[in-house]
Amino acid sequence: MTKTILCYGDSLTWGYDAVTIGRHPFEDRWPSVLQEALTGEARVIAEGLNGRTTAFDDHLADCDRNGARVLPTILQTHAPVDLVILLLGTNDMKPVVCGSAFAACQGIARLVRLIRSHAWPFDFDVPDILIVSPPAICATANAAFAAAFPGGIEESRKLPTLYRDLADELGCGFFDANSVAKTTPIDGIHLDAANTRALGQGLEPVARMMLGI
């Protein structure tokens, strides 16, 4: 039976392209690459929103970027789900939103609790959860992005250790995206085509192990 993976993330999951200020082609986005690598054994749903946070409001946005508030609706929309991949935290590094790696970790914990306590329809099973630490923010000459993320380089580097410890504590899977991908210095935040593809490829063995396929 084909498994279902829900990828819940921000612009890295949406496929933001810093070169074109647009969107990577469908085949280059990491959820698409992951689905291709799983060769028909899993259906991968990409739920990426530019600017999405783990659990914090962004009052400058024209949409709801609070990941905790939106998640229950997303879960209900796509049920049943076998695996939820959480790739969030970069936007939490904005001081206007949060500005703290520790708080981002608390936000991820909140999402895990929401998934496990969700009123799944028709007695569907609770999915496994894979926490992914996003690639660290890097230095950039882009004045707007640098101004939006002051201190973000240092804070984002704390996320892998915090997320790994949280995953161990809560019994979730963990993957450090820094092990396969690096952010582009064009804006310091996003992934070029090669790196977003590398992320999808890097997640394949972890997803296979967690799904038992």
Image: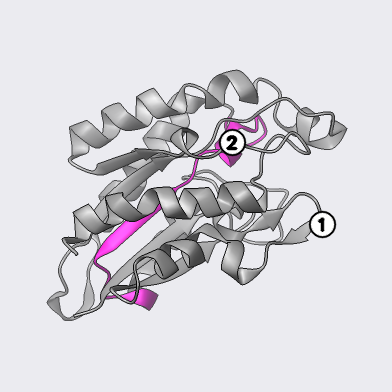
Query: What crowding class fits label 2: few (fewer than 14 Cα within 10 Å), some (14-19), or many (20 or more)?
Result: many
Q: Is residue 38 toward the left or the right of residue 14 in the image?
A: left
- The Cα atoms of the two marked residues, 1 and 2, are separated by 18 Å
- Would you say residue 19 sits in the magenta stretch? no
Amino acid type at mark 2: Lys
Relative to 177, is 5 above or below?
below
Residue at x 41% of width, y 68% of height: 35
Q: Position of residue 203 (x, y in %)?
A: 38, 51
Residue under pointer 1: 20
Q: Give the structural element (helix, strand or loop) at label 1.
A: loop
Question: In this rendering, would 179 be left or right of 28?
Answer: left
Where does label 2 land, which residue? 182
Query: Picture coordinates of residue 28 (x, y %)?
Result: 60, 62
Residue type for callout 1: Thr
Residue at left offset 72%, top offset 25%: 139
Q: Which residues are magenta?
A: 77-98
Q: How is the image coloured?
A: one colour
Residue 200 in the image: state x and y as whole percent.
46, 55
Asked if 9 appears above or below 170 in the picture, the reply is: below
**Residue 181 falls in image quadrant:** top right
Q: Quadrant of residue 115?
A: bottom left
Q: Taking 147 as reference, is 72 left or right? A: left
Q: What percent of the width, then of the height, locates residue 158?
A: 47, 21
- Kindly tell me whether residue 114 is visible in this rendering: no
Q: Is residue 155 visible?
A: yes
In the rendered image, residue 86 lying in the magenta stretch gets the answer: yes
Q: Is residue 1 above or below residue 97?
A: below
Q: Quadrant of the C terminus?
A: bottom left
Where's the N terminus, which quadrant?
bottom left
Instruction: Indicate the secondary structure of the residue bearing disc 2.
Output: loop
Q: Residues within 10 Å of mark 1 (few under 14, many from 20)?
A: few
Nearer to the camera, 31 or 88: 31
